[in-house]
Amino acid sequence: MSALRIKKGSSSHSAYDLRSNFGDEIERHTLAVTVVNEPGVLARVIGLFSGRGYNIESLTVAEIDHEGHRSRITIVTSGTPQVIAQIKAQLGRIVPVLEVHDLTAEGPSVERELGLLKVAGAGEKRVEALRLADIFRANVVDSTLESFVFEITGTPEKIDAFADLMRPLGLVEIARTGVAALARGAK
Amino acid sequence: MSRQMTGAKMVVQALKDQGVDTIFGYPGGAVLPIYDEIFQQNEIQHILVRHEQAAIHAAEGYARSTGKPGVALVTSGPGATNAVTGLTDALMDSIPLIVFSGQVPTFMIGSDAFQEADTVGITRPCTKHNWLVKDTETLSTTIHEAFHVATSGRPGPVLIDIPKDVQFATGNYTEKTKLKSKYQPQVKGSIEGINDLVKLMEKAKRPVFYTGGGVINSGPAASQLLRELVEATGFPITSTLMGLGAYPASGKAWLGMLGMHGLYEANMAMHDCDLMINIGARFDDRITGRVDAFSPKSKKAHIDIDASSINKIIHVDIPIVGDVAHVLEDLLKVWKSRGRVTEKEGLDKWWKQINEWRAVRCLAYKNSETTIKPQYALERLEALTKGMDRYITTEVGQHQMWAAQFLGFEDPNRWMTSGGLGTMGYGFPASIGVQLAHPDALVVNVAGEASWLMNMQEMGTAIQYKLPVKQFILNNERLGMVRQWQQLLHGERYSSSWSEALPDFVKLAEAFGAKGILCSDPKDLDDAIMEMINYDGPVIFDCLVEKHENCFPMIPSGKPHNEMLLAADADAFASGAALV
């Protein structure tokens, strides 16, 4: 037990161990959280993510059972396996949270997002935009002589790809809903 | 049969139905209707504190020393914001509290009205759950649900924000028995996990129980079962700051507290064990030290009612989610039914090793004939109050660690301290809450002068309610723990860590109508402590101690358990030699 040799600037000069203990393999998970639809419940979920430093890549919420006062929050998050496990456990202890499902871990699932894209332009670019929209099975939901508004549904990656193609063709504005997801199969 | 009453009356009625006898609070415009109802009854005693933070800490002291939830009542705006520190403290230490706050009338919410604050917004991250009640019809159910949530699962503080018009309006009162809560945490642990743990216990050569506040929160049965388990297996046991008293300090398997200022033998046992059984503790960073070097050779089991505590900081091999008492009962049953097996030979060797560590006498200090050493003061307090019906609270800092090291706790619920949040100013109001719950007991707040000043206004409360709380202040005229860190780790640059312009504590006591005792000579200490104990009323004991004493052992942050700094090493460490 000789005196400790502590180098200046090492974490021993802090009140905390400044080394992070976590690995660096980041995974992306989609979580489906059923909650009691009461005031402040979304703030609790978001506050948990911001307060504990977790990532939110996408978050959607809507009531799914009016009589039972239940809402479903779909969260796409990323982190190390340990952080993902911690996120699920932390969500689970919020009092109005009824169920937490990790759709990424619990088997195959489908994910869909809806995007609205406004593309303005004329001439060949306008025709090209329409042609690409057709390939992507995007619908035209508004049209003027100088613009279209496309509605596209698919995985986030599909919407990304469509948006990338529209950018040089006059993409003006984009609105996305975030991901809704369900497990595949009968249950 | 439904009963019609005003919201304000519902609050009082629900408290009676929940068996509440004491609440702590401070009135204001937005809670006047509730105070009017309190005035018109005698079953519930209201204790007027001098600051809302103290109301929450007093309720914590009441809760921690009784096992019942604590209740506080504050007004809107500043009343609620003053409660935030106490709520956070209770959340970190899992103390069940129900806090009522007044709110501006529903139709004024959001208008920046006088004394308006977004109380549910502000307290959302520092409560287990909270509610803004907008309809008197739902008020009584919400209160019953609040008691259920605060006391079920991992306990914690909850808050109910009640707008003034909801207090005035009339609605149906719903009985406590009608509550159907969806919140039902799991209390029984998985039997597979328990079986796996028993198998490891049978083979363990170097096991250790690492217990925490969860044992105390689980209730007296949990402490009883823990004692039975320790005696039956002969495994050594250490505990966190929050868990002291669950296993008696006089028990022969007791290693003392572990952690940053824990005992050498406890930390070494944690580092070298081959089986660590965590019961109701949460691998706090003050416990683990350097995480990647934490107990490298052990299998780890973790019993905790909160699933999010498991694998949060330390990966464990056997996670068991459940209430400590339930799990320990099953664990004992399984272990007994399999023939009460332990690895006798390995255990004997392990105890031999532990006794060698004990021989280091890590708490030894150099006493003085002329100056009171803080350790000596606590040794004398321990010797003179041992066997009394005694409750100890503390503030936060060196004195708190010394109290944990030098005072012995034989039973749970006798030790109230701010562990997770480390709230200076906790101890004095907590001692008031404890004394109200145990009017005939000796309640001592072991304090530092700097912490104590943070809630000294509560002298008024102690005097008003004739609470004979003893404020045992180890006065070193320093922020001792800050000073220690600056000495050891910041090149002896003592930035703002001394207390200048301290009051004369004896005169201060007298100004409030209490007794003040000054003691600076070790020879007078015993008599002075006895004078404090025997005085029937609140006492401020100004114990002038060595100003530059350091608290050891100490695990510097970022170091593993087996690299503790002992008092003997400190000179070399402090001389600056290590601070290249």
Image (spheres, coloured by chain):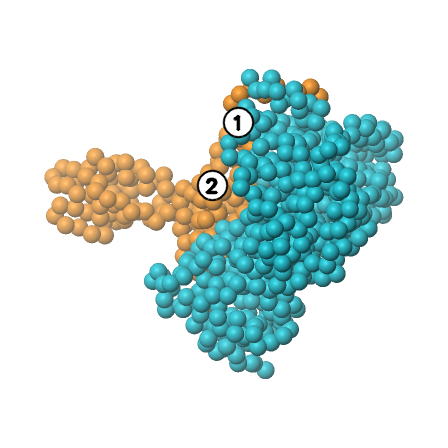
The dot on residue B493 is 1
Label 2 residue SS? loop
Of residues B413 and B346, the one drawn nearer to the viewer in this rendering: B413
Q: Which residue is mark 2?
A: A54
The residue depicted at 42 percent of the width and 58 percent of the height is: B118
Q: Is residue B450 left or right of residue B187?
A: left
Quadrant placement of the N terminus of chain B: bottom right
Same subunit: marks 2 and 1: no
Q: Tell me the chain of label 2.
A: A
The residue depicted at 29 percent of the width and 39 percent of the height is: A162
Indicate the position of residue B277 as horizontal and vertical percent values. Answer: 73, 40
Label 1 residue SS? loop
The reply to whether callout 2 and callout 1 are in contact (CB within 8 Å) is no
Q: Among the chains, which one is orange?
A: A
Residue A21 location, quadrant: top right
Indicate the position of residue B319 as horizontal and vertical percent values. Answer: 67, 42
Indicate the position of residue A174 as horizontal and vertical percent values. Answer: 27, 44
**Which tint is chain B?**
cyan
Q: Tell me the chain of label 1.
A: B
